[in-house]
Structure formats: structure tokens, C-alpha cells
Image (spheres, grey):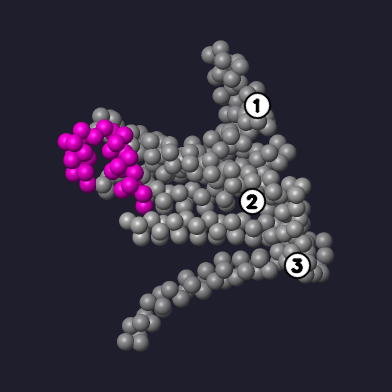
């Protein structure tokens, strides 16, 4: 019996050791270094307590802007991807839509591209003078709509979030389609016999039965949104100024200029934010399961 109980651990031990050495241990060391003045300019590392965290959360700190931008990006892109992905999934599972698989493939295809490639392509397309979008708008007489999409402080962050939503909505669509196809058609047949409209079916059948799928999609979107880097860096590098800076772009800048302690402190703050949000989401899922 002891051998049978230990047998699965023989297979898991290798992965567990690698995870501990490459993920868990560096994470703990990073949190430890956040309480020091570790930098590239001296070999001496001194303990400074909570000084790095105080620098982040003091009233006039630019780091608060990075944290606020990260949270705003997460909320907006999570809602946008979920709503658009759900709408596309509902549309591309209707019987009257032709070539559904081809259309699903086209919408999903940006997901297989790297964020760097998508960012560079859109950076070229959104160029104020030579970009495709502005030239197209001017060509059809809509000069007033041509904007400095990546340099105007008023629209640059919405632009970045729109590009990110465009890339990620296909993945959410595929996840929701899988959930829709798992719903027994008898529910809809009974609802139609009772005279329920599309929106009544959506409210009372589709959304409740899709709740586990939507919760999982939300968790994926939230964890990605809080850790976003590639899209912002490739499009704007956090600019103009700090208008689109997020926590990970700030971490990159701190490491680049040699302030390793502040970089690890920002990473630790991000870790605690992700941990708190995931705990809240998981507890919400457990409470909803108990109610059901």
C-alpha cells in the first residue's frame, strides 16, 4: 500500500523540483530583495525595510500611475474581450450563418500571433502620416477622424486596449463556443415552445449555464491583464510620457537603469495584487456553487 501511495510522487517529483527551483524559489528571493537597496552600482546589499514600498505608495509617486493603468487596462480589456467574445460566439453558433468554421478561424487567428508582431503591425498601421488607418480615413473624406493614435494623450491608452482586445477576443470566442455546444438543445426547444425570445433564452438559459466558462475566461483575462507587457511595450513603450505605463513596463525600466531592488518591489506588488484578485474570484466561485 505504501508503494502504491508513493508511486504517483515518483512522476511528480521531477516537475515539482523544477518548479521549486525555477519558479517558487526565485519568487521568494525576489520578495526578499524588495526589502533591500540592491542595485548594479555596488556589491553591498543593505536591508532598508519598507522604504521601497513607501516610495511606490507615496502621494506623488509615478508608480501609482502605473498601478492605476494596470488595473484600468485589466478591467476594460476583461470586460471588452468577454462581451465581444460572447457576442461572436452567439453569432457564429446560429444556424443561418454560413462558413462558420472559416469565420471562427479568421477571428481566432490573431491569437496565434505573438504580441510583439501584433504590436509592430499596428504601430505601423496607426502611424499619423504614413499609417494605413489615417490614409484610409483621409481617402474617404473623413479627415477629421484621422488622429495621432499612439501619441495623443487622450486616446493612446484606449487605442492600446482596443488593439489588445482585438487580439484576445478570438480566444474567448472559442472558449465560449465550446461552452455553448455543450448546452443540451432541449433547453432551447422547451423555451421556444413557451414563446421565449432570444434575449429571454440568453438571460435564463445561456448565461446561467455558461457561468463556469465565463468565470474561467474572466480569470484568464484578469491574470493576463495584470501581467501585460508585450502589447504596451511594442506599441508605445509606456509612452507618451508615462501615459500607457503599466507595472511590468515600470519593472523593465527599473531593471534597465540598475535599480534592481525597485524592480523586484514592483514585481512583488504585482504578485500580491494578482494573489488577492484570484483569491477573491475563487471565493466568489465557491460561494456561487454553494448557492446553486
For the point 64% across and 51% down, the residue is 248
* Residue 193 position within the rendered picture, expressed as x and y whole percent measured from the top left: 16, 36
- Disc 1, SS: loop
Determine if the magenta segment contains residue 192.
yes
Mark closer to the observer (3, 2): 3
Q: CA distance from mark 1 to mark 3?
A: 44 Å
From the image, tell me which residue sits under label 1: 148
* Residue 198 position within the rendered picture, expressed as x and y whole percent measured from the top left: 28, 33
- Is 221 on the left-hand or right-hand side of 196? right
From the image, tell me which residue sits under label 3: 49
Q: Are marks 2 and 1 in contact (CB under 8 Å)?
A: no
Determine if the magenta segment contains residue 159.
no
Label 1 neighbour load within 10 Å: few <14, some 14-19, many 20+:
some
What secondary structure is the magenta-colored segment mainly?
A: helix
- Is 165 on the left-hand or right-hand side of 134? left
* Residue 274 position within the rendered picture, expressed as x and y whole percent measured from the top left: 56, 56
Amino acid at each position: 500500500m505504501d508503494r502504491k501511495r508513493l508511486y504517483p510522487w515518483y512522476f511528480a517529483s521531477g516537475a515539482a523540483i523544477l518548479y521549486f527551483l525555477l519558479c517558487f524559489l526565485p519568487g521568494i528571493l525576489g520578495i526578499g530583495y524588495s526589502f533591500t537597496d540592491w542595485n548594479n552600482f555596488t556589491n553591498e546589499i543593505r536591508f532598508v525595510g519598507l522604504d521601497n514600498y513607501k516610495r511606490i505608495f507615496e502621494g506623488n509617486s509615478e508608480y501609482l500611475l502605473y498601478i492605476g493603468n494596470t488595473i484600468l487596462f485589466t478591467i476594460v480589456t476583461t470586460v471588452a474581450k468577454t462581451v465581444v467574445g460572447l457576442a461572436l460566439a452567439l453569432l457564429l453558433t446560429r444556424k443561418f450563418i454560413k462558413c462558420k468554421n472559416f469565420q471562427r478561424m479568421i477571428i481566432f487567428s490573431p491569437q496565434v500571433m505573438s504580441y510583439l508582431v501584433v504590436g509592430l503591425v499596428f504601430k505601423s498601421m496607426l502611424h499619423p502620416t504614413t499609417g494605413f488607418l489615417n490614409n484610409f480615413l483621409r481617402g474617404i473624406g473623413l479627415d477629421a477622424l484621422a488622429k495621432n493614435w499612439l501619441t495623443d494623450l487622450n486616446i493612446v491608452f484606449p487605442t492600446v486596449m482596443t488593439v489588445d482586445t482585438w487580439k484576445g477576443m478570438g480566444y474567448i470566442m472559442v472558449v465560449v463556443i465550446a461552452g455553448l455546444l455543450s448546452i443540451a438543445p432541449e433547453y432551447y426547444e422547451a423555451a421556444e415552445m413557451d414563446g421565449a425570445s432570444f434575449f429571454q433564452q440568453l438571460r435564463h438559459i445561456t448565461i446561467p449555464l455558461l457561468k463556469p466558462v465565463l468565470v474561467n475566461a474572466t480569470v484568464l483575462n484578469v491574470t493576463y491583464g495584470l501581467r501585460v507587457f508585450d502589447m504596451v511595450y511594442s506599441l508605445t513603450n509606456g509612452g507618451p510620457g508615462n501615459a500607457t505605463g503599466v507595472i511590468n513596463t515600470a519593472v523593465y525600466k527599473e531593471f534597465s537603469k540598475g535599480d534592481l531592488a525597485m524592480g523586484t518591489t514592483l514585481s512583488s506588488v504585482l504578485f500580491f495584487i494578482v494573489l488577492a484578485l484570484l483569491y477573491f474570484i475563487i471565493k466568489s466561485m465557491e460561494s456561487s456553487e454553494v448557492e446553486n
